[in-house]
Amino acid sequence: MRRLLLLLLGLLLLQQARCFEFVIDGEWEDETSHIQDHQERHKRAILTSEEQEDFEAIRGDDITVKSYKVESRITSRFAHTTVRSSVINSGSKAQSIGFNVQIPKRAFITNFTMNVNGITFVGSVKEKTVARNLYAQARARGKAAGIVRANSQDMETFKTEVHVPPGSNIEFELHYQEMMHRRLGFYEHSLYLQPGRLVPQFQADVYIFEPKGISSVETPNTLGAQFNELIKVTQSKDKAHIVFKPNLQQQRKCDNCSGSAIDGVFTVRYDVTRDSNAGELQVSDGHFVQFFAPSNLSPLPKNIVFVIDVSGSMWGVKMKQTVAAMQAILDDLTIDDHFSIIDFNHNVRCWSEELVAGSSIQVADAKKYIQNIKPNGGTNINEALMRAVQMLVRASNQGLIDPRSVSMIILVSDGDPTVGEIKLSTIQKNVKRVMREEFSLFSLGIGFDVDYDFLERIATENRGVAQRIYANHDAAEQLRTFYSQVSSPLLRRITIQFPEDSVSDVTHNRFDKYFSGSELVVAGKVLPSDSNTLTSFTTASAARLDITLETESDTSELDQELAKQQHSFTGFARQMWAYITVKQLISERSLAPTAAKKRKITQRIMALAVEHQFVTPLTALLVESEDATERLLADTPKDPKHGCCSGGAGGGSASAGLAPVRVVYQPPPWVQITTTPPPSQAAKGPEEYALPQTVNLVDNDPHFIVHLPSSNMDVCFNIDSKPGHVLNLVSDSGTGLVVNGQLVGSKQKLQSKRSTYFGTISVYYQPDGVSVTVGTDHIAMSDGSSNHSFTWSATADITQDGVRISIVKDSHVSVVINNNIQVMVLLHRVWKKHPVNVDFLGIYIPTENQYSPLVHGLIGQFSREPEVSVYDLHQGVDPLKKEATMEVKGNRLSVTRGWQKDYRRDKRRGSSIYCWFVHNSGKGFIDGHYTDYIVPDLNSFLQTL
């Protein structure tokens, strides 16, 4: 029997709307001349027929598809997908049977195998020239290969065709990998299911494993209402399984139909549990991945210049959809934002020559302007972008915009330049030359007459991203969705770094911006070390804040957990590092300034792609029989009008054109990263060395300890108040400082008494309007206009104006004001199921704090140390506790010798401090009665006693 009459294996790249082409060469080309560009656009315009062809996963006239199964294993945002199908040629004649798989554009094919009547063809990724030379030998013996391109919004298509005799059994298996990108608060995984016929064994499985936990899973109704009840979701804390397994009857379009109703995208959306703003550091298989997606931060104000193409080609649905999108986008602006609009054809017009505030009046006027635009004429992109940059530069020079705001240009265009400067490389150089480092350019290409590769280059080179907008009925929604992704910048100038000699081969670790709902990802290799912990440090700027965050990860814990998981992808970290690196190198290659630099990047891409088996624009998939006598070839075709891939890792743009940041990080003084501290340091807390030895403190339920330096004496008292009451500890109207604490009660009474503790501590500094509120679950910071929140789950350092907050993970928070006032809050955790006790806080205030003479409060009043004498020491009721008489503030008090606890050194057992205990809630020792210190809210100053 003849093994194979014809083998046809291709990669069908669904890219640009209304075009298809046959391509054999997959190499990129350098920029062509203007005339060649026009010839290419004409070619794209007339090759449209293939798009009308209906897609089917399995093609053939008289065949039986026994099974079609898709399985995705997503581990820590990295997906490995396998598509398998078993087919029989049921006809009486030999025929061609096709196997087509649509995959996401951002995915890399990693392998393909095929078994034809017992003969196995196995795929391997090789450098393109090597693969073609090997393939040429098989091709010379009558084999053929081809690559076809059509178009789609988000998908590419892998296509195989095999000509077999009747009765043949064929099994296909395709593998591809991709990283999940977080957008608008979730990850989305899509499987294109379009079998084109009924399949006895049809099944799609998605397994998700996220070590930190899965916060939500949903399956949007993208396949049709009739399948809603057939999609089953099983979820635990860190795992989820989504399965779609319709039987033959459930697959039918109707009860008596022979056609399949399965025709669409099977979508799974999910997000992960985040217990801190510091991010998630995972280490596995000698590699690390750092995920950074903070929330609970106030957005930065933004300055936007919208640059809109209104040339003649925008007439009709493109302009209508753009206007509709702009109406909604303008409504999103706030009074803190500044904006303007530039529209261009062969001329350039400005709605306003200067940036204006996003007030309701200005927005209404801008919307009216947009509504009246009439497209006509040519396309002068260069002049429009120059005017936009000049507008931002002028506003910055004149001090009209907040120096911590985010400035961006959003370009919307549907065509190549035809007026003014038309050479793309010159436009790119012009934009790069005038753009400031703090500006970003985002490019939106509408339709397929635009050079998307050019738009992506100028965006990537200027700290932005590009996106294609498909010119159809939902173009307005696509525009709005893109704007939503960049409309809420939370952080600027983000850098993720690691201690010296701990990591290598780190991907881009410096990002210009972080947008709400997205995620920044950095990966690399972990160097051998005696330590079993890897630490990362993230620095960033928010609205008025400078932030440093610390994250730690055990280097072996995750591998042990992955080994227990049945459906996890154990090599995720290694492959994710390679995936991000190759994507970034491809982006850098398109921006390479010299041919030598380009060749060097090309060699590295090919080496990584071959090592990790990725089909890229520089590699090919060689599929050959076991005896290597028959070969097929699949490679990626040339597409000069489509940018291959984005260099960013989602959520922010890597800072292009800037010197790379070393991964060495000198930690701030509040961080201890020594793995084997000397004995004298081993028992100390991470910040104890910075704390004065003499403090006034309140801890437990609540016990006050006041240190009197002149008398070298400690005096203790309790306050028996009610849950919910706010007690003033320090009130200094002279410096503008308030420290208050709110009481929380135990879960139950013990011996008819409910204990109270401090559940919330507030430090309010009136001159800067900054309030720091420390609770047992999070730490909040507010300045009246911005609100930020941090958890106890990560070490962090936050600075705003004269206020600095240092958080030590699950331990304590220190608040320092103007370097002369310090407050430390200690966290006490209890067993969550404890029948009585609750989490609570202790507060430690140095006696050296520099207050004004106006300071008061339960603790603040003792900055003016009263004269105290203790005499008449005698045996008390308790033989272990002496009693005495204390004279203070004109009062004669009976006091008892006892001890209370200082928990700074040992949070579990505490250190005993011997003190004289004043009874009756400190009566006679404190000014007035303790109820005089109850204030209305956490930021209230104490009224004059």
Image: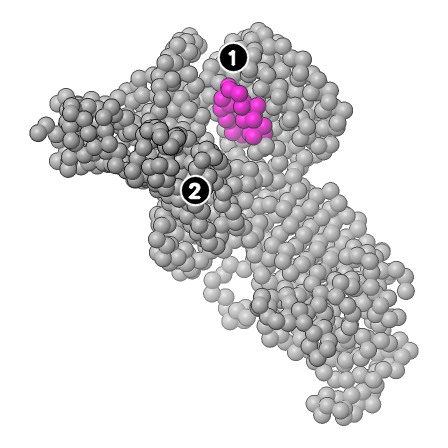
Residue 555 in the figure: left or right of residue 694: left
Q: Secondary structure at mark 1?
A: loop
Image location (x, y in percent) of residue 863:
81, 67
**Where does the N terminus fall, quadrant-wise?**
top left
Q: In terms of image quadrants, where is residue 541?
A: top right
- Residue sitting at x 37%, y 42%: 245
Is 754 rendered above or below residue 816?
below
- Few, some or many C-alpha atoms within 10 Å of disc 1 (few <14, some 14-19, many ≥20)? many
The residue carrying mark 2 is 231
Q: As drawn, which residue projects farthest toward the left?
A: 1
Residue 105 in view in this figure: no
Q: As drawn, which residue projects farthest toward the front?
A: 256
**Where does the C terminus fall, quadrant-wise?**
bottom right
720 or 669: nearer the viewer:
720
Between the C-alphas of marks 2 and 1, the distance is 48 Å
Q: Is residue 895 magenta?
A: no
What's the amino acid at mark 1? Pro
Contact between marks 2 and 1 (CB within 8 A): the answer is no
Image location (x, y in percent) of residue 704:
75, 72
216 or 792: nearer the viewer:
216
- Residue sitting at x 56%, y 56%: 793
Image location (x, y in percent) of residue 459:
52, 26
Residue 1 in the figure: left or right of residue 810: left
Q: In terms of image quadrants, where is residue 703?
A: bottom right
Q: Is residue 482 magenta?
A: yes
The residue carrying mark 1 is 417
- Residue sitting at x 67%, y 26%: 330
Residue 191 in view in this figure: yes
User: Which segment did they paint magenta?
Assistant: 464-483
